[in-house]
Image (spheres, grey):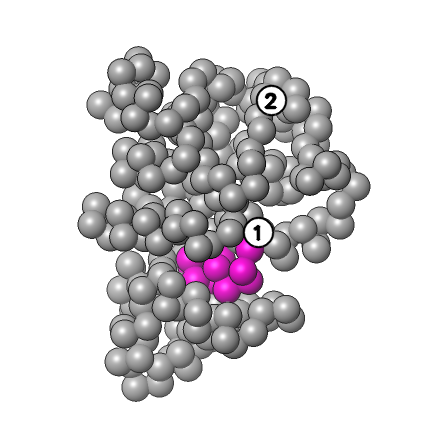
Amino acid sequence: KNLSQKFPDASEYSFKNITLNIASGEHICLSGSISSGRTVLSNTLAGLNSSYQGAITIDGYSLRDLDLSNLRDKIGKNVSQEDIFEGTIIENILLGKPNTRYEDAIWAINTVGISDQINNMPQGVNTAMLSGGKGLDLDLVNKIILARCLAKRPNLLILNDYFHGFMKSERLKLISELVDKKHKWTMIVVSNDPVIMAACDRVIIMDDGQIKKEGRFQDLLKSEELNKLIA
């Protein structure tokens, strides 16, 4: 509520006076230009930026009063390929998480649709990966990153510009799985892709650090704000 973020060395706010309610289990698409504040907002909601003004509450508790390390264990957030380290596929998915089981990693592998690819490798989930995933198919590396997010069975899933590297058919397959109501997580996706927008419950369009428009994708199709993004 009344959320603002300005970094110490910045002259302008990344976003200002944002009031936003997200229901448990809702799937939100944050859209806008690179400078709209959408990515900073998603990072702030994930507890990565502590210098915000205003209030963030989760189930009635202020984010400032919560144990952030415990909170982050309940949030699945995608990383870049540079965060893939030298180790096996299963090690990269589990990432030393004490509360994540081997069975959760296998479930995540199946959920993102890479079980056949991995099972066809001579070493399976124990196949070695190089730093940054070098030598492996880019789609496979990105799905391993997503599997890492899902393996912790998150309450909140945050994906920043995750889908743009996939073909349309693959984007549709992935987002259809992630928004399936069998999964109980709340999801915030940063994307200007109409395929992703249409799959989410609500699209929030940001510009210059403000929410300019929000609603269902179908209801926003005739709006100027949406057409600027997808033209």
* Residue 74 coordinates in the image, percent (x, y): 61, 54
Which amino acid, by three-letter code, is at mark 1? Answer: Asn
* Residue 19 coordinates in the image, percent (x, y): 60, 22
| Residue 147 falls inside the magenta stretch | yes
Q: Which residue is tagged 2?
A: 19
* Residue 125 coordinates in the image, percent (x, y): 40, 79
Q: Nearer the viewer, residue 182 or 68?
A: 182
Q: Which residue is tagged 1?
A: 155
**Residues drawn in magenta:** 145-155
Q: Is residue 172 left or right of residue 156?
A: left
N-terminal label among 2 and 1: 2
What residue is rendered at 27% in x and 38% in y? 195
Q: Residue furthest right?
A: 65
Q: Say which mark, if any, is on residue 180.
A: none
| Residue 218 falls inside the magenta stretch | no
Q: Nearer the viewer, residue 24 or 114?
A: 24
Residue 29 vs 149, above or below: the answer is above
Q: Is residue 121 left or right of residue 46?
A: left
